[in-house]
Image (cartoon, rainbow, N blue to C red):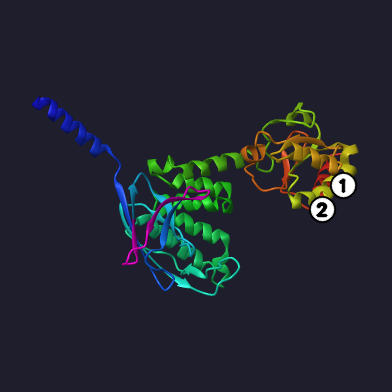
């Protein structure tokens, strides 16, 4: 019997010992805009959006305490119901304190209550990653100075790499790099990724997203042959982009609801009218979610002279790392990218120049 009790005791001890630690975040909110009884929310950020993680009521000491299971660092922010929201900070240890002041200013259309947090960062005590995030923000503020030297993006990027060199295991810097990755050349982005040495960091979702972004961009740099993809046309028949090898191809990603896309349609049409007889094909690829909206736009805009495809495979994002439209690019007869992000007169002038040198 004693052995059974001992076994159960050891088993319980193992369960407790193996469970994840808990965090305790104490938040103090002061100012004429905050009163005991206010509902305070804790929001978590996953790299794409904020979601409510917890809520608590502000007590007589102007404090709330949030507790929960601590699995890994997470970007969080504080909001007071009906009033304001704080800047974000990083919950990266089991015992942290955050302080801010809620003020009442002049109400406006976007903030009818007039309540807001002070513009300064949350004062956070207890988290290394939040200290790194604050240091980065201080560096960014420095670049707002009038001195042109500090406004140079290249200088900015080099200083950010210096921060990684000093903190090669920082989750905060990976998160920040994920947000500013478009600011770096692919070569420098690769260098930044190599500088992170922690195994946990390299398994992090932000690190993997950056690596995936870079791999996709490398496949679609100027001069690269685009990967083949197959999409349905108006009649439902599948069309391979590789079928257009041997011709220049202007590819236009668009949608029926996109005003700028409609604004570029006359330029796309002019490219077709000027150059189709000389070997240019125009392939439009709609990102409309509803097939009906896509086909109605084709009819209204009289786009039947083009090859019209429907992006049912999320080619724009998966192959070209883009979410914004219009996205217009030009391929040569071997399927290599000659130019991308074409707008305005370049939509017909760039293909005309490229084709004239090869006729």
Would residue 218 be found to the left or right of residue 160 on screen? right
Label 1 crowd (10 A; few <14 / some 14-19 / many >=20): some
Q: Residue at x 50, y 48 (%)?
A: 47
For image coordinates 49% across by 41% down, the residue present is: 208
- Tell me: 77 left or right of 282: left
Answer whether residue 161 is visible to the viewer in this image: yes
Please tell me in which quadrant of the rendered image residue 304 appears.
top right
Point out the stretch of residues depicted in magenta.
Answer: 45-65
On-image quarter of the C terminus: top right
Measured from the top left, where is residue 199 in percent x and y? 38, 40
- Which of these two is toward me, 123 or 166? 123
Q: Which residue is mark 2?
A: 345
The reply to whether the magenta stretch includes residue 56 is: yes
**181 in relation to 299, above or below:** below
The picture places residue 154, in percent across and down from the top left corner, at 56, 59
Q: Is residue 48 magenta?
A: yes
């Amino acid at each position: 019997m004693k052995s059974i009790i001992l076994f159960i005791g050891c088993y319980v001890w193992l369960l407790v010992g193996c469970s994840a630690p808990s965090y305790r975040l104490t938040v103090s909110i002061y100012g004429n805009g905050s009163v005991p009884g206010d509902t305070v929310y804790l929001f978590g950020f996953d790299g794409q959006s904020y979601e409510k993680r917890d809520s608590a009521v502000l007590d007589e000491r102007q404090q709330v305490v949030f507790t929960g299971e601590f699995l890994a660092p997470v970007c969080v922010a504080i909001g007071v119901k009906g009033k304001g929201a704080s800047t974000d900070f990083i919950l990266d240890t089991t015992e942290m304190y955050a302080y801010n002041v809620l003020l009442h200013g002049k109400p406006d259309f976007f903030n009818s209550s007039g309540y807001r947090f002070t513009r300064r960062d949350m004062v956070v005590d207890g988290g290394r990653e939040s200290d790194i995030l604050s240091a980065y923000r201080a560096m960014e503020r420095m670049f707002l100075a009038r001195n042109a030297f500090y406004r140079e993006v290249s200088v900015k990027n080099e200083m950010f790499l210096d921060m990684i060199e000093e903190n090669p295991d920082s989750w905060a810097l990976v998160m920040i790099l994920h947000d500013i990755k478009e600011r770096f050349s692919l070569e420098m982005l690769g260098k930044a990724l190599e500088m992170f040495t922690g195994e946990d960091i390299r398994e992090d979702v932000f690190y993997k997203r950056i690596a995936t972004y870079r791999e996709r961009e490398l496949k679609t740099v100027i001069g690269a042959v685009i990967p083949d993809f197959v999409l349905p046309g108006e009649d439902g028949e599948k069309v391979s982009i590789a079928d257009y090898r041997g011709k220049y191809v202007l590819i236009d990603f668009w949608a029926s609801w996109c005003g700028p896309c409609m604004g570029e349609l006359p330029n796309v049409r002019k490219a077709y009218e000027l150059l189709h007889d000389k070997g240019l094909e125009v392939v439009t690829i709609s990102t409309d979610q509803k097939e009906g909206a896509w086909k109605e736009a084709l009819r209204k805009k009289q786009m039947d002279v083009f090859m019209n495809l429907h992006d049912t495979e999320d080619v724009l994002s998966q192959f070209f790392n883009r979410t914004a439209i219009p996205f217009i690019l030009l391929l040569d007869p071997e399927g290599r990218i000659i130019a991308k992000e074409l707008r305005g007169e370049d939509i017909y002038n760039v293909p005309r120049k490229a084709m004239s040198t090869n006729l």
